[in-house]
Amino acid sequence: MEVLKTEALTKIYGEGESKVTALDNANLSVRQGEFAAIVGTSGSGKSTLLHMLGGLDRPTSGKVYVEGKDIFTLKDEALTIFRRRKIGFVFQSFNLVPTLNVYENIVFPIQLDGNDVDDKFVNEVIGTLGLADMQNRLPNQLSGGQQQRAAIARALATKPAIILADEPTGNLDSKTSQDVLSLLKVTGQKFSQTIVMITHNEAIAQMTDRIIRIEDGHIIKGGEPND
Amino acid sequence: MTKVNNRKVIDRFSFRELKANRKMNFVIILSIVLTCILFTALASIGGSLINGTQQETMRQVGVDRMAGLKFVLPEDYEKVRSDSATRDVVYRIIVGDAVNNEFRNFSVEINYAGDEDTAISQFCDPTTGRLPEGYDEIAVSTLVLDALGLPHELGTVVPIILNVDGEVSEHEFKLCGYWKGEKVAMAQECWVSKAFADKYAPTLTERFNTLEHPVYAGYWQVDFNYTNSWDIEGKTDALISRLYDNRENAPDVGINWAYTTSSVDGDMIMGCIMMVLVIFAAGYLIIYNVFYINISANIRSYGLLKTIGTTSKQIRRMVRTQAVAYCAAGIPLGLIIGVFSGKFLFQAIAASMIVYSTASYTINAKLLAMICLASAAFTFLTVMISCRKPCRIAGSVSPIEALRYNETNIHTKKREKKTRKVSSLSVARNNMLRSRKKTVIVVLSLTLGMVLVNTLFTVLKGIDMDKYVRSLIVGDFVIMHDKVSRNGDQNAMITPDQLEYLNTIDGVREVSPIYFRSGKLSFHDEPLVRLKTLCDQYADTDKYGSLANAKENNSIPTDIYGITDDVLNVLEPTEGKIDPTKWQSGKYAIVNTYYLDAEDEKGELLYSVGDTLTLSSMKGMDEDISKDFEVMALCEMPYAICTQSYYLFGGQVIIPESAYLEMTDNRNAMSVMMNADENRFDDVDTQIRYMTDRSDSQVIVKSKQTYLDEFSDLIKMIKLVGGTLSGILALIGILNFVNAVVTGIISRKRELAMMNAVGMTSSQLKKMLMWESIHYAALTATGTFIIGFLLDNVILKNITEDLIFYTYQLTFMPILICVTVLLLLSAVIPNIAYRLICRESVVDRLREN
């Protein structure tokens, strides 16, 4: 089943001479349960693509469908709510709320929605990610790897349609990177999550199901699911 | 050691940083501008008030020189002139007084103006014509001409009845000059020629203080300035020591009390220091706050600078350079707005009070320059002191910490945090708690501002006109002989005829004569013991033998007052209770004893309730009767209806009218207290004045209304100035709040974007920010209520307890208003600020470091 689909997605920054086409007519499709890596050099447009997949940024033209829904028909407020229900983000710099403890951070999007927390599920996620002992800690008392695991747990907790990870290992050493990525992959499989991840690390990219290459705003390889 | 010339780089970098940070700059400069406006506006209002009252008081005193020697000889004048400390020395020669009947409402002095500037220094320089030269020429004020009914025309014949130390002679002068008379002046001046002065008041040779019977004519009055008006008293004291070896020979000196700085007293200095501190605190709070927040917001860039090798010292220098740049931008703007708003405010103030001439109150260029200079210096100082701590924080940042810095890193003692349900409110609360120090600083600064506003308002609200007027007058009217009121002449009385007239006035509710005579209060038993103790205790202060006399005769001189029941009702006993039925019996008296040099008020109380006193009239007046009374209560005779003069050591005994009239056949009253029917006040006033305004009448009337009118102008002025001050402080407090909220939001741009990214909607975010503001407002309100209550109820109440024009009232009105405003702003500001940061996309905000 197709979870994520883009149609002729284009993003242009600036005007006239300073005009930059960050993303040019990108077509992409991701299936349920896939773990895909978007790979490209810096400035290739991969971050722009990811931001648009997550509804953080609006395209100049083109469409993004998440579970068949054209997300940019939504107004900002509705888009935010859609994001917190359907999309889990994992950032390079973890982006945990500094005043909330690990558990609160994990359930933050759920509670923002005013929903009750599915404790069984969340505990399972926490257990899988090895965070059980540090649920009450504040983010600044965690190591980088631990913080990223907490961020992954947060992304999983809402049972989103898709998890978008923006260089999730960019701030981590190689050993920790391997660990975190393995965990991401394992949990993705366990909870049958669709994950799209940005990286410029080939080794990391090789751990995924599919590699999407992007250069100068064009998807040059891997736009369609492997068959 | 090599000196590295890196200043230029640092400075250039500082300015680059400034340019990059426009929003923050605006906030900081705005706060500097505000502080500067506050200082400048206050300084110019204060400046014009002080300068204006000084000018007006000078006109009242009748001289603009700082100090003067009284009744001296030409040699003294030369001495003063040759002293290096004195400036602008002038003299005049006393000739006498003009005692024409037309002048009974004011004093008219006849003098000779010795120096060119004498007349100018006395505000009596002829604006038309000139000073007299010929023997029969005279220069007078228009008030003198008006009183005599003469035209304002040079050459007019001016009839003057001259009193030279008791010798009265009549003269006809020719008017050679006149000027507009000052109504406020204590005396009107008439200038005569040297020839005339020489004839009637030839210069003397004997020193004034060696005279047995004082004469004044022929003595010189010498007035002079010093380089500045600071501590004129001290300077004059030093001058006298320099000029006269023997202090006994030294002439009397006069200090011009128009100069507020003439005597340096502790209270005044304390008052000024307090005032300056309040303003300073207000400025400090707002600027400190902004700098602190600014540095928190920029801490990463400081960390970055450190990682590339910038030293703490260099960073501190950068922040200081930026502060100076902010000042350079903010102060001139603040000065301009401050001067104009000060002028504008002052016009409002001046419009509400009676000023003799607005000219006295205009700020001249010199004063303006001083005000601007002082305000600029003061603002600059405030900024530099305010940014010291933030400077240190910026300098002491560790590079790694700073790069990670997200405010959580400052002192979180708790390693763990209990899990609670997340909502906009709880996140807001966590945010408040995370940087407790910042929260405390913001709340404290807001609280302090509000407390100041509230206390100031309480002070203003407590000013009690009625209470003040009650200390000046009892009843609606007091009628009294002019000589009693002016000279304390106890023999000048209101006759039974006059009393009768007053009784016939339409609309009068009551006419209560107050009878008075001098007498003797004799002591025995317990009070006598107290008397002796008092005499012994103060024996060394007894210069005039009043204590010794009292001890020898077991008696003190006393005022005896006979009063009606109406007057009895206005008495407020300090001890004992007034019982009207007992009072009727005529066996009771209300008494007050005093020794003016006593330090301890309790020690003067020679009687207590229940003691017996013996009252007798003075020898030589009526027959010598003695009578015993029992003390019913202790109470002072209200100043407005007493003789208004005091013995050094004496008493006041108040007895019922009936008992008084038994002691004497004299039916003259010393004063009369009158009350009018409601709404008939003006009517009664007119009718009383019909009697008192007759030219042969020497009786004057004081009405409550005139005091109220007089006082209400002063009150209006105080309230306006105070109101303006508290308004400005409240404004600063509110802006401080806005500042704290806005900068708090702007500096957390990235964090808010991140929360938005993980699904917190804008409305949830706004709600959270709103809750934060509400927390600030609520904490501030609580703090203000507590501190304000303590400050007002404990300190202010005690200070104001003894003030005659003040009734303490606790009020929280301003706090309630301010808190309402803060709450309203809490609803609006976060919305606006959030919208402001939302101009950048979430992605951009997330990318920002």
Image (spheres, helix red, strand yellow):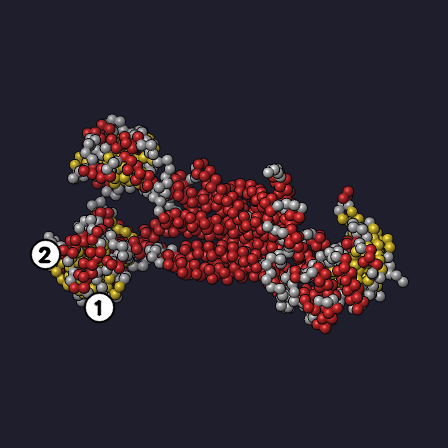
Q: Position of residue B102 (x, y in %)?
A: 23, 40
In the displayed structure, B277 sits above or below B151; it is: below
Q: Chain of mark 1?
A: B
Describe the element under mark 2 as helix, strand or loop: loop
Give the residue pinned by disc 2.
B623
Q: Which residue in the rendered view is the most extreme toward the top?
A: B134
Q: Residues within 10 Å of mark 1 (few under 14, many from 20)?
A: few
Q: Chain of mark 2?
A: B
Describe the element under mark 1 as helix, strand or loop: helix
**Mark 1 vs 2: CB contact within 8 A:** no
What amino acid type is highlighted by mark number 1?
Thr
Q: Which residue in the rendered view is the most extreme toward the right?
A: A227
Q: Position of residue B734 (x, y in %)?
A: 53, 54
- Label 1 to label 2: alpha-carbon separation: 30 Å
The quadrant in which residue B14 appears is top right
In the displayed structure, B266 sits above or below B831; it is: above
Residue visible at 61% across and 37% down in the picture: B2
Q: Residues within 10 Å of mark 2 (few under 14, many from 20)?
A: few
Q: Is residue B218 left or right of residue B58?
A: left
Quarter placement of the N terminus of chain B = top right
Q: Is residue B461 left or right of residue B112?
A: right
In this view, the residue in front, B830 or B603, is B603
Residue visible at 28% across and 37% down in the picture: B241
Give the residue pinned by disc 1.
B581
Residue B144 can be seen, yes or no: no
Q: Is residue B247 left or right of residue B366?
A: left
Q: Position of residue A72 (x, y in %)?
A: 76, 58
Labels 1, 2: one chain: yes
Residue visible at 18% across and 38% down in the picture: B210
What amino acid type is highlighted by mark number 2?
Glu
Q: Position of residue A43 (x, y in %)?
A: 78, 49
